Image (cartoon, rainbow, N blue to C red):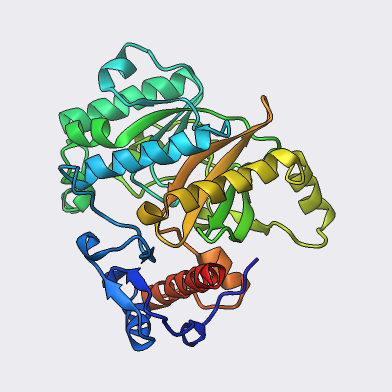
Amino acid sequence: MERIVDYRELPNSNGQSIYFRMETDPKLYMTLLMKGYKVINNIKDSTKDTIYVTGRRQDYTCKDFEEYKALVDSKIQESLKEDNIVKPKLTRFSFDDLLNHKYKIPFVLKNENQNGGREKFLIETEEDYQNLIDACFFLMEKNLFNTTPEALSDEKFKIDYDKYLNMNFIVQEYIETPTKFNTTVRLLTSPSGDLLYASLKYKEPEDYKDDTSLLGYLLSEVYPISTRSIVSNTLSGGKNLLLGENSYKKHDKKLLDSHNIKSSKFDDLVNSSLKTHKKYQEELGIICGYDYIYNVEDDKWYLLEYHSRPMVGDYSKRQSIPYYTKEEKLSAEGRVRATALTLSLKNNR
């Protein structure tokens, strides 16, 4: 695990061009300027030597950001696929397909634009399936006859759910992990070829609860689905097990061994992640968080998602860096980017 540097530890510039969006962290932005870096925020001002501290947000061959994001997603997945790392089978959610029972149980219905385990639903019984249909009917028909005036003022009721469901949700193949826990692995990489941080997130299944959205409320309370939550995210109460320690407690070692963390397959996963980040550093920026899930049935790792602005709370707290307020989170993210930039500059010399 790399030590997170302080802003003042950033080396002075030798004229490097840095692409950086100030809104990400104003303090890091000012630090770069004070240390003599040429900071740009327009792709047209970049050169072949520009280092992208934040990923570019626009491609001039694309009509909008959504088209650009889809392009980048396909590139990342194509790169990982070269090393036999793929996503679980995915299909775009369709209410018509749901009604026609075209989805094979068990499956995961999730909002691909939500983080922290929100709006992620495991459908594993016929009763779950019917309750999902009923909940969607509720939303599509805006059937609010049992809703209080106070609830109607809530922002989550002011959504065009016809578009919301079909545009945001995907149906994902359910993957069985090795133990009783819900588990995922987070790799935090730098295009310098350094693995900044790696951890196994795990959480014991518990009663399903997600009332952060109207759909979550309906499937938790009105049309309840199965009680087995699949979330491992630490934001939702999951625990974090740092990889690469010299020794582990018996419970932790057993959990890691069940995922073959010391195998060559896991080493290949790390190397493929680093290679992909280096290849697409311009799009991803100086840090990238990959979330993977291990399938016990075929002994393979699958990509769940990647983040060009990953949450760095576990990494920061591990080094006693505050990560509670909005300002602290911005500062922690800035310091992690400063760490990755320092490594990149060091490797380029």
Residue nearest the viewer, comparing 349 with 288:
349
Q: In the displayed structure, would residue 167 be above or below residue 209?
A: above
Image: 59 above or below 296: below
Residue displayed at 74% across by 47% down: 256
| Residue 4 place in picture, x, y as percent | 56, 75
Which residue sits furthest top? 100
Question: In x, y percent, where is residue 27?
Answer: 35, 82
Q: Is residue 269 left or right of residue 107?
A: right
Please, is residue 217 above or below residue 325 in the view?
Answer: above
Give the image location of residue 205, x and y in percent: 60, 42
Nearest the camera: 225 or 176?
A: 176
Residue at 15% x, 38% y: name it: 160
Residue ID at (31%, 69%) = 20
In the rendered image, which quarter contains the C terminus?
A: bottom right
**x, y (%) of residue 154?**
20, 53
Camera-nearest residue between 202 and 15: 15
Left or right: residue 207 versus residue 36 is right
Residue 21 occupies quadrant: bottom left
Q: Quadrant of residue 72?
A: top left
**Can you tell which quarter of the image residue 137 is in?**
top left
Image height of 170 relative to 273, above or below:
above
